[in-house]
Image (cartoon, coloured by chain):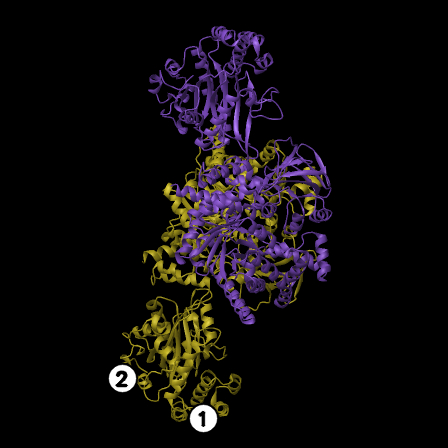
Chain colours: A yellow, B purple
Amino acid sequence: MLQATRKDAAVQNDPNVTLITPEAPVAVQTHGGRTKCLQRLVRLDLPVPRTVGLSFDAVHNIARGEMPDLGMLLSPFDAGELLCVRPSSEDPDWGGPGAILNIGMNDARYVDLSERLGEEAAASLYARFVHSYAVLVARLDPDVFDEIGMEGKASLSAALHAFEDETDEPFPQDPAVQLAEVLRSMARAWEGTSARLLRQAKGAPADAGLGLVVQSMALGFGTGECGSGVIQLVDGQTGLLQLTGRYLSQSQGRDALEGRAEALFLERDPRGPSLEELAPTAFKDLIRYAGLMRTKLREEMQAEFVIEDGRVHLLDGVRVSRNSRAAVRIAVRLAEDKIITQQEALMRVPPVALNELLHKQVDRDFAHDVVGRGVAASPGAATGKIVFSAADAQASAARGEACVLVRRETSPEDIRGMHAASAVLTERGGMTSHAAVIGRGIGLPCVVGANEMRFQMRKKLLTGPGGRVFKEGDVITVDGTHGEILAGDVAMLEATLDDAFQTLLTWADEERDISIRANADTPADARLAKSFQAQGIGLCRTEHMFFDDDRLTVMREMIFADNSEDRRAALERLLPVQRADFTELFQTMAGLPVCIRLLDPPLHEFLPSDHAGHRALAEALDLPLSQVTRRVDAMGEYNPMLGMRGVRLGITVPEIYDMQARAIFEAAITAGKSGASVVPEIMIPLVSAKREVELVKMRIDLVAAAVRSETGAEFDYKLGVMVETPRAALRAEEIAQEATFLSFGTNDLTQMTYGLSRDDAGRFMSDYVRQGVFSEDPFHTLDVDGVGELLILGAKRGRAVRADLVLSMCGEHGGNPESIAFCRAAGFDYVSCSPFRVPVARLAAAQLAIFDKLG
Amino acid sequence: MLQATRKDAAVQNDPNVTLITPEAPVAVQTHGGRTKCLQRLVRLDLPVPRTVGLSFDAVHNIARGEMPDLGMLLSPFDAGELLCVRPSSEDPDWGGPGAILNIGMNDARYVDLSERLGEEAAASLYARFVHSYAVLVARLDPDVFDEIGMEGKASLSAALHAFEDETDEPFPQDPAVQLAEVLRSMARAWEGTSARLLRQAKGAPADAGLGLVVQSMALGFGTGECGSGVIQLVDGQTGLLQLTGRYLSQSQGRDALEGRAEALFLERDPRGPSLEELAPTAFKDLIRYAGLMRTKLREEMQAEFVIEDGRVHLLDGVRVSRNSRAAVRIAVRLAEDKIITQQEALMRVPPVALNELLHKQVDRDFAHDVVGRGVAASPGAATGKIVFSAADAQASAARGEACVLVRRETSPEDIRGMHAASAVLTERGGMTSHAAVIGRGIGLPCVVGANEMRFQMRKKLLTGPGGRVFKEGDVITVDGTHGEILAGDVAMLEATLDDAFQTLLTWADEERDISIRANADTPADARLAKSFQAQGIGLCRTEHMFFDDDRLTVMREMIFADNSEDRRAALERLLPVQRADFTELFQTMAGLPVCIRLLDPPLHEFLPSDHAGHRALAEALDLPLSQVTRRVDAMGEYNPMLGMRGVRLGITVPEIYDMQARAIFEAAITAGKSGASVVPEIMIPLVSAKREVELVKMRIDLVAAAVRSETGAEFDYKLGVMVETPRAALRAEEIAQEATFLSFGTNDLTQMTYGLSRDDAGRFMSDYVRQGVFSEDPFHTLDVDGVGELLILGAKRGRAVRADLVLSMCGEHGGNPESIAFCRAAGFDYVSCSPFRVPVARLAAAQLAIFDKLG
């Protein structure tokens, strides 16, 4: 059981079956992570039991029936030494067969060990092996052997009998036969269909290999202090430095972790006895070894150890498993301790992990009662009483009661209700439905497309697929991170924007080479964006500004105006409101760029859709109901997404854009007087032809000239185009002649490229992704092949006529790491995403830059 | 007044002011059509008065104030000779200032001519000149001079007085001054804004030039037989050979045509005296000259002539104006007479002219009472009583009464009503709305988007923008060729598919190098397609087959089925119906290729949309009304165009395509037994990813295998993809791996490329085209820049992996000459269009081929 010094020659001839020495030809890609880690421990001169590594090829051959030369394999080990076999896959997440310990136990060894360790200890070792062998190798009924147990002589004898009963053969006695059967069984388990599907689901390639290690056993049983345990230097929940682990005398494997009352703390602890007290020398060694692993392996590791007669053996080391919060703290701490570089720290945190830190989360360590599922549309979790209308949500908020807004789907009319609610649940929609987009924008947990639940809006009932009925006022929890609806209140983890989080993002900004802006429609959004250090606003959707009750009425008057004059009069009243919104926006962003999109949605979205709404509108406008109804009907569209919206409004009802441009310019002047000067960016939506841009530009230039001459103030502004139609991308060369920037709105561009409405796709998207028709939901992950080609074409063609054309992406995809990678590669200047996605985007962008620097 | 023989040297030095001789450097592009035509007549040695041509440049200079050397200009003419000036633009359709005759008349000439021709004749000539000069050159009030008249001494004296009164100057006496003023006035009139806009509207370029001819006058007044007239050898209405014209003694210009009772027929005529009787020699000469013009100018010409003392002078020749029917007959007759080639005959008929021949047309020579306008969506005209529902249309047809179906818009439920109606009028929609597409498909006159009229469906009233009210049962006429609604019955021209039409198209087929197929959904459509000699069916939309009442109920059962088994049971019942449809289709097409598109529209299109419909459906399916309503509601989509349709149905409800494939295969076997063998082409709609094609292909191959094994019959089939999404075009390289043909559905492709719903675009499309935002309605004229690029990309990428990939276009654009040109250039195999567009397409394709052959 000492380091390899002798009898090594034989195995070292075969790279597939190799003794783990500092020089052995071992790599993660050929032998798996555990084998490589053991070699690292060996190189640190740590007390690792003698180990032979079997390569992926070797194991693959075993599965096909070609066993390696067992004599050679066993040559590094002492005769009669007990062995264990452990799996070593390339990525520990991909799973693998369980370890099998105590190989070599047989009647003869039982006699020997009874003498050395005592009969009970020897019987336990033998019984454990029989149990593992019976269940994992001979594939006998586990219940039979679980009942028998694994401790002491009675168990052993019962187990041996049971084995013989079930197989009609005595338990195999030849250690070489035992080892061969163990190896064959583990190799075959890896190749089994269900294991393969399981690991493929975790991202493993179809031909992922399995390595195995054959290690001499440190027994953990016997005379003197013997036992086993695990140790790590950090807490995997908090990420704080905190010696963590358990030790159990006279034990093996993971016994110490199985909640046995007699397990010891490692360090002196008021809660009970500790290894430090029991075996201070071994404890000191252990601490030293763990520290060495941390600094030399440059990672927080969990070590599995055995103490034999007071001497520590390290059997294995694995990366400490950690939640997102801990991942950030660990990476930052390792860098602060100069164990890793800042760049490495940045590379070690998966960007999406930051999402979890921004929102309260369901603490999944506690039981929770799932009553329905849907699309996880906006992360975070919240609890509240069910309400079925936006108005009720506002009433509930006014009473100070948390509520969950339950709707078939949401529309712009629901926005105030959404602001008032703690979470939203809808029957329809997908990742880019209204509820989802708004939810992510304002950080509201949201589950959409929960179409297996029954939504009875009039009866105010919500029924789960299992038949559980919830009525208005009942408490549920919406888990937008996992797309689950839970009954009642549940335990939560708080959001944690701690120092480590801030430090990591500051480091990220030092590395990043693409700008990150936020989509922000209101001053509140802008403040949020600023707090996440967005470098400006990439998309301010002005329509959301018109949904406050007082404004909505004026907006509707404008829509119902019969002539340009009445329309102007209504717009006159909207002007100060818009101007005030923009002024606050500019002031909040304090000189950072702000890109404002002119009105985009079809006007009928501002009209009420039900009878009561029509009647209220008729009253408000003093018009006959029939006229209101007729007008609303006449404005209806078959395919609103493809209808009278965006620049088409700007051209057919130009007064609206005139008013918006004026509001923007006047706000820029006001904000510029009291702070940094403002150069507003004005963006024209849904363009499909150059002439559209020319016409709008002409009028906006006129408004600018008018404002300049009225106020005597000078100001600059930029005019650009939101590229949302395939045609705008294809004709970017023409369009860029009139635009200083192009911002790709990938939501709509995806809809049009696929001919697929995001609002309607929810019904079959999950089917489609499951069947592999689409490899991913293209509204969630940018379709690089189709939509991506249009982006690249548009970018190239635009820059061909205007080398300094500013390019960006402002769809929902903007915050996704893959999309950022795409935009960086295509030479984009910035991406813009919901404020809550900004941290993820900052980290993802930094990782991409580092990846490139590292070559 | 003889041919040029002397004094020519001076003018021949200047190409801008040139005497028209056989050798003069004169071209249509520099001097205009009339000048060139006069040169042709001179070359034929016809008696043309001496003529000087002024080039576009010369006239342009005149407008800018640079008069050419008048001495030189006048040098070819005898001193004291009267002159006229006529316009000569490049295309006679572009208009131009009116001719001015008798230039040079003054008091002195009046005395001379009084002696030669008599005082009254001389006075008439002078009075005419004063009239023209006053109104056209001096721009005096026409009413004053119209009242005075132009005949005899009294008129002359009054006219001269009036001129002096109005201008405070005597009438100019110097012929050179007169000529200079005439030239300047005509040159400036051409450059005027309204003239320019007018001709640009007719397709003239902004810088179109005007030539002028200065011609010595053949007077038409005097002793012996004098007079003027026009002659042509064909009837411009019928195109039949028929000597046509009028002659009036002692007249000038177009006097003979102004309905004067004393005008003579040319040939002996029972209706009255004729030139033939009056002046047989002159008549004989005239006939000879006209015949010479026909054969040598290789066109049916109208000649303007003057007889002076019995001698014929030809002043001018213009192409006989003709309607579409006459155009076809004339072209065919000229070719049959070997005057032109068949290729030339084909080039002389504008393809769209054929459209008019296929349908009854309003005879626009009669007054008609326009009460409303809309989009001219389907050509032809029809009269009938107004009905406001499809059911009423059917009832009306059952009574044998012609009716006009008036709807806000039509939907698939209206199809039977449309078949029953004589014409359709809708409030909404554009060129590619449902009503328009179906209308063109079945040759039904149709006006859509008549949104200036008020449609009161419940009150059954239709009100024109002028306030004219029509109620149910009132008679109106729908002119789908011109987009007009006329009150009552009007005179009509019958459709004329005569021999000349058939001959022309047979010649076209000899030249054509791209195939033309028809879109045909029913056996009736197919027979129509066959009668127009379509080379197959390029698009059979199977959904229309499900709208017959009996089938619709089963279809709805299928839609309401809760599980795959019930769905199959309903589909079992649809199978024989589909099979029978397809069998008849294959039999009708007798071995020509038939391309069948699998079900495309969202299923909710098959469900009733109103309360009564829901109730009927609930009864039919024996379900509670609430359940029906709930289900119908749940199936509603925000953007049906971008929703659950096409291949998305095929993948999520695969039983439908299974049934359709089986029906197709079984029909192919049946039809193949009794006739030519059938190789059906199956087309998958709305594809956006290769995997969609793979999945559908897999199942269809299985169905084929099953049918083969059940029947023992062998059959082939082809599977292809309808390219309707930008993504399918972009990813054609992948998709073509699974498809033997790609057919570009340019309707949907245009919608998605522009992000523009054809159903909703009607509201602003005319605005957009008027403002030049789009140069044309892209649903009407293929957008070559945007959609066209996708077509070319798709074609190239598809052929890159499959060199024999069959490419075609099957949208509404398929029948347009420009689209056919595009498809030919892109190497497409065929285009497919409505049956009624097939003749146009055949001719257009022939013209393109000829154009290429001519280089």
Image mark for residue B446 = none
Picture quarter containing residue A375?
bottom right
Viewer-closest of B482 and A8: B482
Amino acid type at circle 1 is Pro
Q: Position of residue A217 (x, y in %)?
A: 37, 83
Viewer-closest of A826 and B169: B169
Q: Chain of mark 2?
A: A
Which of discs 2 and 1 lies nearer the camera? The answer is 1
- Does residue A439 show up? no
Amino acid type at circle 2 is Lys
Task: From this view, report whether residue A317 is shown above or below residue B792.
Answer: below
Q: Position of residue A128 (x, y in %)?
A: 45, 85
Badge 2 element = loop
The residue under label 1 is A170
Please say if the residues under marks 2 and 1 sit with CB atoms less than 8 Å apart.
Answer: no
Picture quarter containing residue A23?
bottom left
Q: Position of residue A823 (x, y in %)?
A: 41, 51
Q: Position of residue B533 (x, y in %)?
A: 53, 50
Left or right: B632 with respect to A838? right
The residue under label 2 is A7
